[in-house]
Image (cartoon, rainbow, N blue to C red):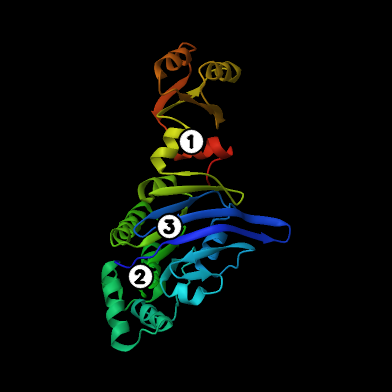
Amino acid sequence: MADALSLTAYDLWKTYGDEAVVQGVSFTLAPGEIVGLLGPNGAGKTTTVGMLFGTVIPTKGFVQFGPWQLPGQGQLARAQMGIVTQEDNLDPDFTVFKNLTHFAHHYRITGAAARQRAGELLALVNLEHRADAQVDELSGGMKRRLVLARALLNQPQIVFLDEPTTGLDPDARQDFWRLVQQLKAKGCGILLTTHYMDEAQRLCDRLLLLQQGKVIDEGTPTDLVARVIGRAIAEVEGVDPALLKDLAARHGAWYRAFGSAHLVTLPDGDPETLWAAIAAHQPSRLVRRPANLEDVFLRLTGSVLE
């Protein structure tokens, strides 16, 4: 994409009555970059996507996409955008192929051009063998791939993926991830909302962590883990919580109850001293593992993603 465009959000706010569901969100999405919005249900992810796509009018702030500003020039901007919403909203009265050719009319792609583009996209998402099938004959993963194909009809420069793999089995999720990585390789900018940590870790170049509509931290997945948690964490069971808390405090470590266990960060500079101190209290279970994004979110928000 030689003339690929960046998208920038400037101080986006959205309030409904007295409730601010998005508060001061600002960031830039560059061509060929995948930015993830990570947050629990109700954090404002879908509302943010709506403002970026131009279907939700911000209470304050605006979006700049190339020469177009949203709100105001949403129709022109959306001609270069694609979106995969949480709902499949495919037309059950049409075949797989017809769902694409019919929707292509929205972009004034008709006749032979529409049929050619539909065929190209079905090949891309590996659904050409189901071209004549009815939508209700497709598996969940196939439907998500068809929705993605539909979002690509206009060869968009930016694609919004709003929790695109929710409810899919592991194989279907892997298939979808491969398609997303192909789009990135072609220079498409992608905004992904997800509550799957493995998805965020695998796909995203940068993450924005949302809580109650605010960006509470941002960075690459690796940077966030290293900066907020460190390299390693201990999962401990069977040790007096007060004792563990005191041990963590003395070693400058983060400590948190987590289900029936407790989590304690192991300091990067000297993890062995704290590890040995915990082990000396003969816990019923003691596991050392690499820190991950789930730990980051737990430390920053006090809760896990669900």
Q: Nearer the viewer, mark 3 or mark 1?
A: 3
Q: What residue is pinned by disc 3?
A: 29
**Residue 247 placement, left or right of 186:** right
Kind of residue at badge 1: Asp
- Under mark 2, the amino acid is Ala
Residue underneath mark 1: 295
Secondary structure at numbered mark 2: helix
User: Which numbered disc covers residue 40?
Assistant: none
- View extreme (top): residue: 280
- State the separation of the CA atoms marked 2 and 3: 22 Å
Percent position of residue 14, x then y: 63, 60
- Name the residue at the bottom extreme: 111
Please give the label number shown on residue 149: 2
- CA gap between label 3 and label 1 equals 26 Å
Indicate left or right for 130 with 9 as reference: left
Q: Earlier in the sequence, mark 3 or mark 1?
A: 3
The residue located at (60%, 68%) in the rendering is 57
